[in-house]
Amino acid sequence: KVIESDALDVLGRITLAQGHPLEARRHFQEGLILQRELKDTGIVPSLLEGLANALTSLSQPHDALRLIGAAETLRKKINVAMTQVERPEHDQLVSILREQMDEAAYQKLWNVGRAMTMKQVIDLALKDNND
């Protein structure tokens, strides 16, 4: 299941790059479900960041920013650095999100995400509504 989760992360990124954010969201969510079943957090930050990218494409910047904040905290907690491939995508996403709201709203949502429990993050990640 760990390999499946890694594959879903890659597939989500490819699908997103092809312009299919709904399908990409589904791949990232499926990867998170597998990670939850395994009680493994190693790839969760990457899945959350990919999902945040898909949500940004689906005009859900608030949820996206909360997920980015949560992913940052989780990376620090489990000591998993962002890869050279992930960094530019992350930086571009953060830049897009900053442009979509004022600094106060940005910081508030980022901090909310950073303070979320793993259960709260997964619940947020797995919801399907368009806020």
Image (cartoon, rainbow, N blue to C red):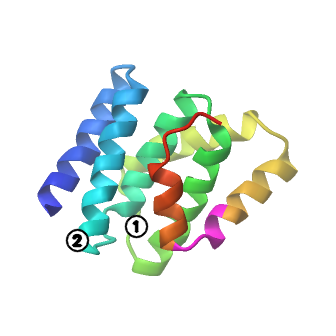
Quarter of the figure with residue 67: bottom right
**Is the C terminus in the top left, top right, bottom left or bottom right quadrant?**
top right
**In whole angstroms, how far apart are the C-alphas of marks 1 and 2?**
21 Å
129 or 100, nearer to the observer: 129
Magenta: main secondary structure = helix
| Label 2: element kind | helix
> Which amino acid type is shown beneath numbered disc 1?
Ala
Q: Which residues are magenta?
A: 113-117
What residue lies at 37% left-to-right and 62% top-to-bottom? 44
Q: Which residue is mark 2?
A: 38
Task: Determine if the magenta segment contains residue 116.
Answer: yes
What residue lies at 86% left-to-right and 52% top-to-bottom? 104
| Label 1: element kind | loop
- Label 1 crowd bin: few (<14), some (14–19), many (20+), radius 10 Å: few
50 or 60, nearer to the observer: 60
Relative placement, left or right, of 115 versus 47 is right
> Which amino acid type is shown beneath numbered disc 2?
Leu
Q: Which residue is mark 1?
A: 81
- Nearest to the eye among marks 1 and 2: give it: 2
What residue lies at 69% left-to-right and 58% top-to-bottom? 110
